[in-house]
């Protein structure tokens, strides 16, 4: 019996994905550049061995798969993927599908897709979320490629995906780079979500002087409410964990330098490319950069000291309730921005991205999974072409209710010198977005003054320049 699918790359993600595929009753051929890894993987596969065809040569691997052959490539992102594709290509035949399941930049995915266009082969760029656990037990899967190639893999991918209730968290989202693009924006939103949680934690720790265990209790409570989500759940667990060496709270012993691998940065770059304001995601990426500059921050603290904290909120319980609402309000802003980037990209790349479907397949199997995404799914289902999530009836109701608490929290943090750039960015975004008459009339006047760029008048009079003569006069 031939395999239903093949997989190259038995590293952490690839081996977990392969076991998941086998466990769901799909026969799978596996190959790894270094054959020892294939042998080890097969030896440790236990009762799943019957579903696996371990291969040590590309010829043997390709022959083991039922045509048209879907082949998942789950290796180190970047050049290795191009190298692997070149090695594979001469062995494939018409209709075969190379599937890059790593964390690729969607622009590379578009290039790879285009390169195969006239070869008879095709390419799928597939975003796989949920890390190692997700790969093994059910990831959220975002697929980009031709609809025909999707049909060939739909059954296998549906069987291995995460399920929200019984709904599979996998979908075909559009042509070429659509899947990897959506995965990138998923990660951008994840950056913002994590940063906002960390800022709230900072207020509880440095403003209210609470211990890790006390803060864990707060997040534990919040996880029962509207903020219920994987990230809030793990935040509670993280805050509760003790260091096995010293017995102290683990989190208190961890250096405050955050790492990043690039998807947050790509989200921001693409937001800028598409002309979308994604302030909370930008703030989150910038915050990670600043976090990594530990020495500079310590030196600056020596120069400036830290401001005195603002008067402690009289009603601590009410303030903690404000923090919960503020986090929800800011989260709405971050998600609205993420979806706005996708909406702009969808037009730019002709993907026709299905917004309700994207929210739907993020409800389980990925890092940002939450109840909240179920609400986003409903909002977009009712109105798939709405300009911004914030103005949907469900989310405008949330924002109306939570914007005052967000204001109080950001004010307290600003007066106390506690950094909350993502929360403040979400607030700034909202204030700019919902103000009909802003202050850019002044910018237009300045631009016209120094560069004769012209402006539109509010009274409809067609006189696009101001009475300031030539800007060059000032030099
Ligand atoms: P690992 O480091 O565990 O494994 C790397 C794999 O890539 C090995 O099988 C290795 O083969 C193979 N490889 C490296 N270079 C080449 C090459 N030039 N040609 C052929 N094979 C090569 O990686 P991960 O499993 O952690 O990551 C794989 C992909 O998944 C990456 O794109 C990563 O970004 C993504 N990822 C996604 C996560 C998610 O949450 N979705 C989490 C982690 C990773 P060999 O044994 O011969 O060295």
Image (cartoon, rainbow, N blue to C red):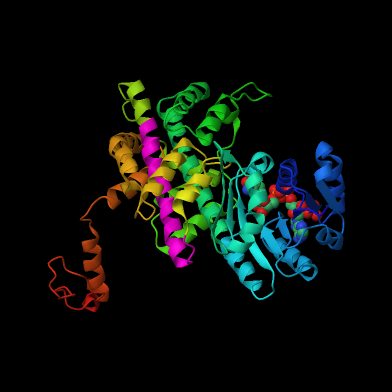
Asked if the stretch drawn in magenta spans residue 333, the answer is yes
Task: Using the rendered view, name the quadrant where residue 402 is placed.
Answer: top left
Describe residue 285's horizontal placement relative to residue 389 as left or right. Answer: right
Q: Position of residue 303 (x, y in %)?
A: 44, 42
363 is higher (above) or lower (below) than 89: above
Q: How many marks?
A: 0
Task: Using the rendered view, name the quadrant where residue 81 is placed.
Answer: bottom right
Quarter of the image for the C terminus: give it: bottom left
Q: Position of residue 243 (x, y in %)?
A: 64, 25
Describe residue 41's horizontal placement relative to residue 21 as left or right. Answer: right
414 is higher (above) or lower (below) than 357: above
Describe residue 85's horizontal placement relative to residue 177 as left or right. Answer: right
Residue 102 in view: no
Residue 394 in view: yes
Asked if the stretch drawn in magenta spans residue 116, the answer is no
Describe residue 453's horizontal placement relative to residue 203 as left or right. Answer: left
Q: Residue furthest front?
A: 1
139 is higher (above) or lower (below) than 56: above
Q: Position of residue 326 (x, y in %)?
A: 36, 35
Q: Position of residue 40 (x, y in %)?
A: 85, 44
Magenta-colored span: 324-352
Given residues 189 and 216, the one toward you in this image is 189
Given residues 69 and 457, the one toward you in this image is 69
Q: Residue at x 33, y 49 (%)?
A: 429
State the predominant SS element of the stretch in magenta: helix
Q: Residue at x 33, y 44 (%)?
A: 427
């Amino acid at each position: 019996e031939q395999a239903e699918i093949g997989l190259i790359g038995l590293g952490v993600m690839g081996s977990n994905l392969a076991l998941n595929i086998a466990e769901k009753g799909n026969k799978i051929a596996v190959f790894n550049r270094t054959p020892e890894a294939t042998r080890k993987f097969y030896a440790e596969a236990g009762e799943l061995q019957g579903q696996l065809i371990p291969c040590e040569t590309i010829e043997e691997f390709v022959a083991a798969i039922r045509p048209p052959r879907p082949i998942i490539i789950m290796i180190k992102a970047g050049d290795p993927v191009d190298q692997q594709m070149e090695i594979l290509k001469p062995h494939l035949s018409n209709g075969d599908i190379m599937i890059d399941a790593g964390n690729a930049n969607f622009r590379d995915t578009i290039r790879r897709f285009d390169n195969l266009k006239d070869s008879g082969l095709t390419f799928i760029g597939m975003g796989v979320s949920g890390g190692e656990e997700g790969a093994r037990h059910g990831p959220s899967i975002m697929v980009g490629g031709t609809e025909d190639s999707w049909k060939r893999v739909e059954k296998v991918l549906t069987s291995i995906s995460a399920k929200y209730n019984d709904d599979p968290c996998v979908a075909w989202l559009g042509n070429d780079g659509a899947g990897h693009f959506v995965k990138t924006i998923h990660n951008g939103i994840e950056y913002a979500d994590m940063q906002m949680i960390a800022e709230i934690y900072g207020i509880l720790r440095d403003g209210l002087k609470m211990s890790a265990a006390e803060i864990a209790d707060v997040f534990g409570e919040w996880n029962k409410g509207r903020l219920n989500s994987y990230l809030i759940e793990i935040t509670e667990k993280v805050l509760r964990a003790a260091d096995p060496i010293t017995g102290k709270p683990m989190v208190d012993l961890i250096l405050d330098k955050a790492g990043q691998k690039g998807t947050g940065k790509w989200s921001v770059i693409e937001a800028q490319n598409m002309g979308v304001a994604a302030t909370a995601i930008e703030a989150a990426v910038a915050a990670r950069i600043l976090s990594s500059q530990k020495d500079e921050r310590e030196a600056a603290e020596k120069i400036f000291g830290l401001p005195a904290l603002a008067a402690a909120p009289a009603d601590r319980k009410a303030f903690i309730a404000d923090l919960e609402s503020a986090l929800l309000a800011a989260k709405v802003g971050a998600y609205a921005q993420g979806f706005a980037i996708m909406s702009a990209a969808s037009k730019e790349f002709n993907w026709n991205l299905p917004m309700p479907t994207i929210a739907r397949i993020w409800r389980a199997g990925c890092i940002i999974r939450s109840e909240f995404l179920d609400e986003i799914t409903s909002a977009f289902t009712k109105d798939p072409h709405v300009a911004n999530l914030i103005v949907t009836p469900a989310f405008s109701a949330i924002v109306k209710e939570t914007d005052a608490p967000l204001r109080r929290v950001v004010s307290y943090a600003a007066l106390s010198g506690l950094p909350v750039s993502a929360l403040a960015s979400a607030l700034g975004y909202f204030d700019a977005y919902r103000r009909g008459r802003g202050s850019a009339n002044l910018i237009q006047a300045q631009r016209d003054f120094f560069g004769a760029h012209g402006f539109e008048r509010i009274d409809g009079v067609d006189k696009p320049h101001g009475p300031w003569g030539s800007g060059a006069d000032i030099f």
